[in-house]
Amino acid sequence: MNIFAKKPTAKEALRASKREMTNATRGIEKEIGALQLEEKRLVTEIKRTAKTGNEAATKILARQLIRLRQQISNLQGSRAQMRGIATHTQAMCANTAVATGMQGATKAMAAMNKQMAPAKQAKVMQEFQRQSAQMDMT
């Protein structure tokens, strides 16, 4: 790790995180696909052993099938969590962008309020009304 390297911006960190999450999700999906192929193979093998009447082998294969399906469901849960985390980080980045924009708008409003000085504006308006009233009387 380079100690002189500058710290990545939030946008760069989000992009790197998103890339890592996508790669992890793709790996999980690949594993799920392989397990589903194995499940199909096991189902056909169970049917074949059941036809031959080999009850012990059929029970063992059925247990393997149950474990395999549990693994698939666990991996699908992990994939959903990965996608949820990716969505959450993206939403957090969007929220920080909105907060930054609001901060700039707040500074601009404060500068305008300082420049306009509401008390001074009220005094000018009263003076204008008084002068206008005097013009109307004459």
Image: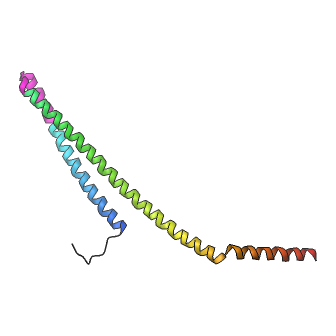
Q: Most extreme residue toward the right, as rendered? A: 138
Say left or right for 112 vs 30: right
Q: Most extreme residue toward the front, as rendered? A: 119
Determine the main secondary structure of the stretch shown in magenta.
helix
Report the magenta residues as a range: 40-56
Q: Position of residue 134 (x, y in %)?
A: 89, 76
Q: Position of residue 14 (x, y in %)?
A: 34, 62
Q: Quadrant of the C terminus?
A: bottom right
Q: Quadrant of the N terminus?
A: bottom left
Q: Position of residue 17 (x, y in %)?
A: 30, 60
**In the figure, residue 88 lies in which quadrant?**
bottom left
Residue 31 to residue 123: above or below: above
**In the figure, residue 133 lies in which quadrant?**
bottom right
**Residue at the spot 33% in from the left edge and 67% down from the top edge:** 12
Residue 76 to residue 40: above or below: below
Residue 32 highlighted magenta (yes or no): no
Residue 127 to residue 64: above or below: below
Q: Position of residue 89 (x, y in %)?
A: 36, 57
**Residue at the spot 31% in from the left edge and 59% down from the top edge:** 18
